[in-house]
Amino acid sequence: MATSEASVTRIMVAVNESTIKGYPHASISSKGAFEWTLQKIVMSNTSGFKLLFLHVQVPDEDGFDDMDSIYASPEDFKSLKSRDRARGLHLLEFFVTRCHEIGVACEAWIKKGDPKEVICHEVRRIQPDLLVLGSRGLGPFQRVFVGTVSEFCVKHAECPVVTIKRRSDETPQDPVDD
């Protein structure tokens, strides 16, 4: 018996790339939030849920990662935009592929901007039943300097929010990395 679209629980999962250099994959926190959602919420009821993956890309001030923009040409910017889009698609492909392997319906999209603002805007626009976010589990001192998207979303998103803290054995050498 097919589940109607109206009776499906829609869960938005905000995902991001790892910040660890040379590691162009989903962040530890994003993978953890996704796996937690599958294990604790979806479980074996794959037809009762639809996962909505949102990746927010943060534009650099000058458009470059670790490059001096003094030598930039218009072609450099086109190639960087293309590279950023490809990286975002690669990230979402990981989650979408996994969903299809286990039979969970899903959608995925990329937005640009400040992650906390964009996530809350997309929650208002899409109106999911639940928002799931990974959290690095930073201490109070680190939060002052880095800030946290998850704390902002807990306070401002217009739906229930679950934050999944990464396990201590998953913490990289620099806990700000993810």
Image (tube, rainbow, N blue to C red):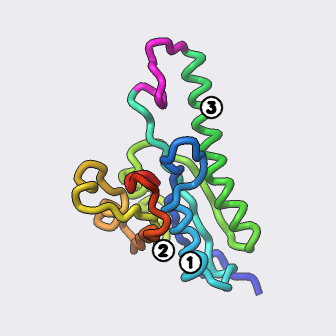
Give the distance between the C-alpha atoms of the residues marked 3 and 2, in whole angstroms. Answer: 33 Å
Q: Using the rendered image of the protein, determine whether residue 131 is visible from the camera's viewpoint.
A: no
Q: Residue at x 47, y 73 (%)?
A: 130
Q: Residue drawn at (22%, 56%), measured in percent from left and top? A: 141
Give the label, 3 or 1, closer to the camera.
3
Mark closest to the chain's N terminus, 1 or 2: 1
Residues packed near mark 2 inside 10 Å, few (<14), some (14 to 19) or many (20 plus):
some
Name the residue nearer the viewer: 150 or 172.
Answer: 172
Q: Disc 1 versus disc 2: distance between alpha carbons?
A: 6 Å
Whether pointer 1 and pointer 2 mark residues with C-beta atoms closer than 8 Å, the reply is yes
Q: Quadrant of residue 69?
A: top left
Does 19 appear in magenta? Answer: no
Please name whichever residue, 40 or 116, is drawn nearer the observer in this view of the structure: 40
Q: Which range is magenta?
A: 62-73
The residue beneath circle 1 is 9
Residue 173: x %, y % from top left: 43, 54
Q: Amino acid at mark 2?
A: Asp
Q: Earlier in the sequence, mark 3 or mark 2?
A: 3
Which numbered disc, 3 or 2, marks the residue closer to the eye?
3
Disc 3 marks which residue? 82
Q: Which residue is denoted by mark 2 in the rendering?
A: 129
Secondary structure beneath disc 1?
strand
Above or below: residue 22 compared with residue 9: above
In the displayed structure image, the side of residue 120 where residue 142 appears, left or right: left
